Each structure stands twice: as C-alpha cells, then as structure tokens.
Image: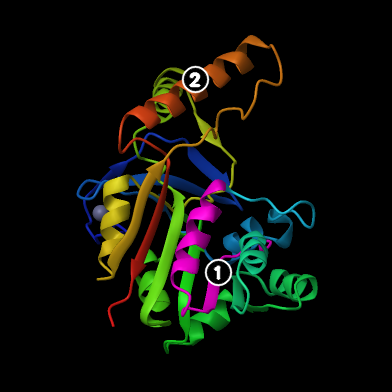
Amino acid sequence: MKACLFCSSTRYRPFAYPAITYNGKRFQYLQCKDCKLVFIDPLPNADDLQKMFPPEYHPEGGEVEIRTYYHDQVRIIKEHSTLTNIADFGCGPGHFLSFLEKQCKGLTLTGIEYTQRMVDQLKQQKPGMSFITYEDFQKNTTPQYDIIRLSHVFIHLTDPVAGLRNIVNQLKPGGLLMVDGPIERNFTFGRWMMDIYFFLRKNMGGKFETDYPPYLVTQTNRSNQKKILEQTGFSPIQWRVFDGRWPFPESLKSAHPVHVTKYILGSMSLLLSKMVPGFGKFFLWTGKKPI
Ligand SMILES: [Zn+2]
C-alpha cells in the first residue's frame, strides 16, 4: 500500500497538478492528509532516473554559477575550521565545490553524483577532488565526513527518510549537515497565482496533462521540511526561508504584455516575501550532529 514518504500515513488525496506521462508511464501527485507533503506516484525507478538525469542535465563547462546562498554556506564552513572533510551530495557540475576550494584552503572535497558517466566526467575536470557515485556512497555506513551538503537534492530522494538516515550515519560526531532547496508548497504570492492557474486549467479546460519529467519526488512546505530535518536530532545552526524569481522571468527582456505581466507578478511575489516572514520558495538549513 502507498504511504506518505515523510510520515508513512496512508491517508492521501489526488493533488491538483496535471498528470505526467513520461518514459511510457503515467505519474500523478498525491497529497498526504496528515503532514501535507505532496509526493509523486508511482515513484520513479532506476530506469526513469537514468533518463531524467543524464550528464547533459548539468550543462558542461562555462562560467561557474555562484548562487547567493553559497556565501552563507561558505561562511558557516569557515566558522567551523576544524571540519575539513566535506562531501557535496548531488554536486552536479561541481560549482559549489569549485567555489569552496577557492575560498578555503586545506579541505578534502568529495562530490557524489548519480551516474557513473557524470562521475567519470567530473574526475577528469577536477583532478584535485574525489568523485563517487550515489551507489558507492550508499554502500558505506561508517562516519567519515565532517560536513555533508545536499543542495536541491532532497526533492529528488525516492526514500527521503532512509536517504537522510544513511547520510547522517556517514557524518562524524559534531559534523554538520547542510540542506537547501525549494519548498514548492510553501506560500508565496507567485505560488498562489500558479495554483489558481492550475485549478482553472484542470477544472475548465478539459484534459490537463504534461510530458514534463517527474523531477520532483516530493514537494514540501516550510513546516514539513523543517520537521523532517529536525527528526535527525541535530541541533539547528541555520534556518532561513527566502524567495526567488523562478518560474517568473529574471529580467524584463521584452515588452510583450504576457512577459511584462509575469515579470510584475514575480516582483510582487519577491516584495511580499521580504515583508512577510515565512513566505518564500527556498530554504536553507544547517544542523550539527550530537557529539
Ligand atoms: Zn505525511
């Protein structure tokens, strides 16, 4: 029987998002009636995941993209100068690892990625660091890292509770777990607008389906996201909710009325999130493992 991926409840309802047809299968989102988590059904299997996350998923080379919250995370790493063995779980093209390497000397850096192809590619590109597959990481169960970071990864875990347990087991006592990513179901003005749009499409426009890959296994809000992280028993060091422009345009590139409207909606959402604590579609959390 299907159960909520966070709280194991078997009480759920179909969620308002369109059904997805991908890799010859039909996926739909369900919402847990107890913890309000939105999760995909069925779960993507190994074949679906390999198709969804080929090395091309992360564009090669180019400028290292520095996201604003990298600075927050590097500051915390600098404040804990005895913690030097750092793993980036789901490191993508290694942007954060490269940024960190430039900011702090003497660190041992490991990147973990899903496919062997991606790992081989990263090993060639960044010879000063180690790279292993998710499968190899999972095989180890002893504490070996001082800091493990999961950036925009939690949403893709098909068993978030077991995944988190395995990650926690690989941290040394006093080590840090850093997690960040989207909280898709948290309130923002933009979210509210999107929900109205989905509701109208689903209820008035006949069949509403998509072939967009089911990337998001779970969609959280700030409460259930914080709660699942606190279940690790770690003492919290950082918790921040903030907003971003996505899926609205980053800049006013054209004068087309639809583009301008979307840009204004994005600006209103950002402004409201700055004014109301708890509004926002991203979170940053860091916790310390008990000694
Ligand atoms: Zn639940």
Foreground of the two, 282 or 21: 282
Crowd around label 1: few <14 · some 14–19 · many ≥20 (10 Å) = many
Mark 2 belongs to which amino acid?
Leu
Instruction: Please state which of residues 31 and 77 is positioned toward the viewer in this rendering.
Output: 77
Residue 271 in percent (x, y) is at 43, 25
Whether residue 3 is visible here, answered yes or no, is no
**Residue 290, above or below 177:** below
How far apart are labels 2 and 1 at the CA level? 34 Å
Q: Which residue is drawn at 58% across and 62% down?
A: 49
**Quarter of the image where ligand 1 sits:** bottom left
- Direction from residue 35 to residue 118 in the image, left or right: right
Percent x, y of residue 278: 31, 38
Amino acid at circle 1: Asp
What colouring style does the render use? Answer: rainbow
Spot occupied by residue 232 in the image (x, y as percentages of width and height)? 28, 70
Q: Residue beneath label 2, please?
A: 265
**Quarter containing the C terminus:** bottom left
Q: In which quarter of the image is the N terminus?
A: bottom left
Residue at image point 63% right, 17% down: 259
Q: Is residue 185 magenta?
A: no
Q: Is residue 86 magenta?
A: yes
> Image quadrant of residue 46?
bottom right
Picture residue at 65% right of the left edge, 70% below the top: 115
233 relative to 275, above or below: below
- Label 2 lies in ligand 1 vicinity (Cβ under 8 Å): no
Describe the element under mark 1 as helix, strand or loop.
Answer: strand
Q: Position of residue 74 (x, y in %)?
A: 52, 61
Front residue of 109 and 156: 109
**Mark 2: secondary structure:** helix
Report the disc number at residue 88. Answer: 1
Left/right placement of residue 49 relative to residue 128 reads: left
Region of the chain picked out in magenta, as a range: 68-94
